Image (tube, rainbow, N blue to C red):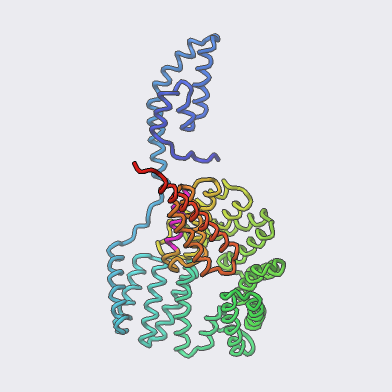
Amino acid sequence: MPLPLSPRRKSFAWLLLVVGGFLGAHRFYLGSYLGGAAQLLLLLVGVGNLPGSRFALGLLGPWLLLDIYWVHLRLKRQDESSAARRPTAKAYDLEALNHADELRERFAVAAETHDWAKAVALGEQIVASARKVFKGPHRNLAMSLCMHGQACYQFKALDEAKASLEESLAIGRRIGMPAEDMEIVRKALAMTLAGIGDERSARQLRAGLPAGGGAGNDTVLLDLLEDREKHYKAAFERRDLALAEKLCAEAVETSRQLCGGAGKAVVFHLISHAEICRQLQWHDKAASLLDECLAIIDQLGLDDGWRLGPTNTLALLHADAGRSDEAEVLYKKTIAMAVALSKGASTDDVVRAFNNLAFLYTNTDQDQKAELCYARAMVHLDKLPPGEGDADLHSDLLINFAQLHMSLNEAEHAKPLFERALAIQERSCRGISTSAATAHNDLGLIAQEEGDLREALKHFKRTLLLNQICAPDHFGNLANAQRNIDNVSLALAAVARAARLEPST
């Protein structure tokens, strides 16, 4: 089945009819290749002094007059087709949505004044409104249930809180709600279960275990698992990878005992262990852990939401080892899974999947494929709510795409991407990060190329400062930033000397 043509420019189609109609150019442009070839053939016969040449030219003239109407019909059909393909927004009850927003404002006031009885009543109205508007699983409904559950917990209506939070968690799992929202619901449900007295279920929920499961001395094992998880995450944050790997391996073994060999907690800690091993350059061990992780996912019948992370890490392993073909296949799988899990929406997982594949193409000198992947990632990024999601992911995507433009000598396209990345970093961490340092460095290079030495010096000084704060052990980056500062300072001094020597007019 042939792919549909991209929309054609009306003015260009009419221009081709007027200027190159006798060559069939307008028909070729609008996709009528046989008609265009026929008109070109009539022209060749007509000017070639062949038998029937005058007859051929006689046919071509009226045909071109008829094509005025044909072009009009063709462009009209294109407009109708574009309108049919254009996605239509869901029609929600705007009055009900506005009413729900008013209820939320009143709920926030009640919560701030600790009027939990009123907050519970408002929460019930908010949930009822969300059910009426969305008529099925939706993030808004899930978070409305979470609000109601938290208010019920504060009001000591623990059974009602448990029911609302469990429904919120179930909806979140079904629709693939963002991890930060899921974490809010899990913590609220764990607090509620603990308040009811089901401390064991609450702690299992916090540990990622199914409530009511486990074997042996669960209390002791849960204590040990929570301790190991807490400490290996802390070690990973301070980049003590050797200690993090040791503690994470112990967490994996503890979760095996709790789950009886295979369970969601085992999968969770295996993924963390594999990532730590990957960063330690223990590629074979990391690959073995990921293979085991995927086997357990298949054994438990878990959905692609669990398979997405280990598949992506396995692709990173292949890419690190130079096996770009294997990495490409896996990255394409992660894209397919992320898109399917998003159910047509734009999510950070979709953005991450396209960004990873584009970065692979960039490193293997496939610039055209990389540019296409980055462009698709940008489409999804632009659809995300401003200021929400993984700020580091968003800025990394923008910087990666900008650096591709830099390599193609397209500084005019790279500059706004770097500036947008800096704006994201400014909101998330006040611009103090290695990503911000990279963006400032490249903006300095662009300013230097444009001859704006003062702007370049400002960016290079900021680069040096950020590298000193965020990556003091990266001596190469520090030396490069200092060298750029020195070069621009010398150039500015030379300009100043030249200005003083220039005779006044």
Q: Residue at x 43, y 51 (%)?
A: 496
* Residue 458 at x, y percent in the picture: 44, 58
Q: Quarter of the image containing the C terminus?
A: top left
* Residue 321 at x, y percent in the picture: 69, 60
Q: Quarter of the image containing the N terminus?
A: top right
Of residue 38 and residue 184, the one placed in the foreground of this image is 184
* Residue 303 at x, y percent in the picture: 57, 67
Q: Quadrant of residue 115?
A: bottom left
**Apparent side of residue 403 relative to residue 364 in the rendered image (left or right):** left
Of residue 372 and residue 161, the one placed in the foreground of this image is 372
Q: Residue at x 41, y 51 (%)?
A: 87
Q: Residue at x 49, y 66 (%)?
A: 465
Q: Compared with residue 251, is residue 84 higher up or lower down, i.e. above or below?
A: above
Instruction: Specify start and end residues of the magenta stretch as a single range.
Output: 413-424
Q: Compared with residue 218, is residue 14 higher up or lower down, i.e. above or below?
A: above
Of residue 460 and residue 235, the one placed in the foreground of this image is 460
The answer to whether residue 278 of the structure is visible from this angle is yes
- Asked if the magenta segment contains residue 415, the reply would be yes
* Residue 217 at x, y percent in the picture: 63, 90
The answer to whether residue 350 of the structure is visible from this angle is no
